Image (tube, grey):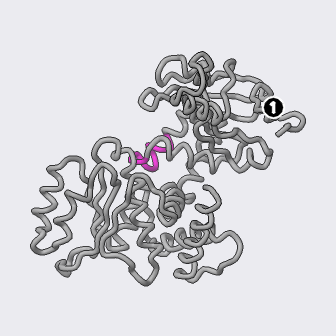
Amino acid sequence: MNKSERLAYDQVIRTVAKRLGIPLRGNIENAIIEYCKKEVDKLLASRVHPKNLIDLLNYVATSLGIIVKEIHKDKDLDELEQEIPPEREPIIGRLKKELNDQTDALILERKNRHPWEQPYLAVINCRGSHSLKKYFSKWHEIVHLLLDGKQLRFAFRRTPSLKREPEEILVDRVAAVLAHHPAYLEPALEEENLSNGKLSFEMIDRIRKKLAPEASRLSTTIACIKKTKEPICFLRARLGFKKDEERLLFAMEHEVIKEKFAPVMKLRIREATSSLKLEELEIRFHKNMEIPTTSIISKAFDGNDYESYTGAELLQTWTTSKGSIGYGKIEIEAKRIPSLNEVWAIIYIKERKGKKHN
């Protein structure tokens, strides 16, 4: 976020906190997340113990009065219109227009429902690439209701695929925690670590299949990394340019410089997620940082799709313009994800020596 975006976000979280009766002090975002976790816990009576995260999602949705409809093809929308005719619920007539490729989900309040019907209808876009986000989209709509507090603020709400509004960003952050609720994720991680050692892609996939098969591998991986007690990092890398190289390319398009000076794309970090333990060590893998050509990650990017490449290397080979980001041994598991044209990697800090330069 830039400064203006941060100010807008801070204003939103303060507004939400006031609505929920949360004190405006300390880390307000964390306080909102904790509030939502407690609200979910309240919905679980002592005799109710959902066996996994899918059951938890379904139970919470039902408890909040939400019926969820997945749309996998256009025919599903036709069937929904037959089930709830627009003549009885006029807002249903908007669904075909609103649930387009730029929309992940819709949620609406039923105005003319039968007494036995749920008051809210969440329509989840599962067509094409949206299907990868359907689990998260369901939690996103649930969180919107939780953050509305006692005063419902909508009759119809559309959730865009690209979330730029501050409130949508906040909802995503809360949903990311609830979708991999610590009460389920932490015991699963503990069980895997006790029997299998450090975190791996195979271990993460076992956890996903056990707790939430509908969840994406990416969201499950990020959630596991954040909850791991070891110094570990998850990277997504793809070919790209430095910012000054992008400016150079822009200048070339306007024939300011000659083509022979054109920069070459290199494998760079697109996204990095670190465990709390790694953050405490003050070792940071920077966004857009170049991946060493000698790294196992570079080998995996040039290698076979989905094949796991593992091995050890030295942290000091990872450098920025200010020098090495640290010293010591690291262990890496990396695999190429062809559908995204990128490589995913888990980096485990096995041994740290000395201090970093930047």
Q: Is residue 143 magenta?
A: no
User: In the image, what residue occupies the spot 32% across and 73% down?
Assistant: 65
Q: Height in image: 342 above or below 28?
A: above
Tell me the quarter of the image containing the N terminus: bottom right
Observer-nearest residue: 62 or 340? 340
Q: Height in image: 356 above or below 134?
A: above
Report the predominant secondary structure element of the magenta stretch. helix
Q: Is residue 213 magenta?
A: yes
Q: Which residues are magenta?
A: 206-215
Please provide percent x and percent y for residue 164: 48, 57
Find disc 1 in the rendering and name its residue.
Answer: 324
User: In the image, what residue occupies the spot 41% across and 66% down?
Assistant: 142
Q: Which three-letter amino acid code belongs to the residue tagged 1?
A: Ser
Observer-nearest residue: 140 or 331? 140
User: In the image, what residue occupies the spot 47% across and 28% down?
Assistant: 341
Does residue 117 appear left or right of residue 348 in this picture? left
Observer-nearest residue: 329 or 125? 125
Tell me the quarter of the image containing the C terminus: top right
Q: What SS does tag 1 mark?
A: strand
Please provide percent x and percent y for residue 192: 59, 42
Circle 1 crowding by C-alpha within 10 Å: few under 14, some 14–19, many from 20: some
Please provide percent x and percent y for residue 210: 45, 46
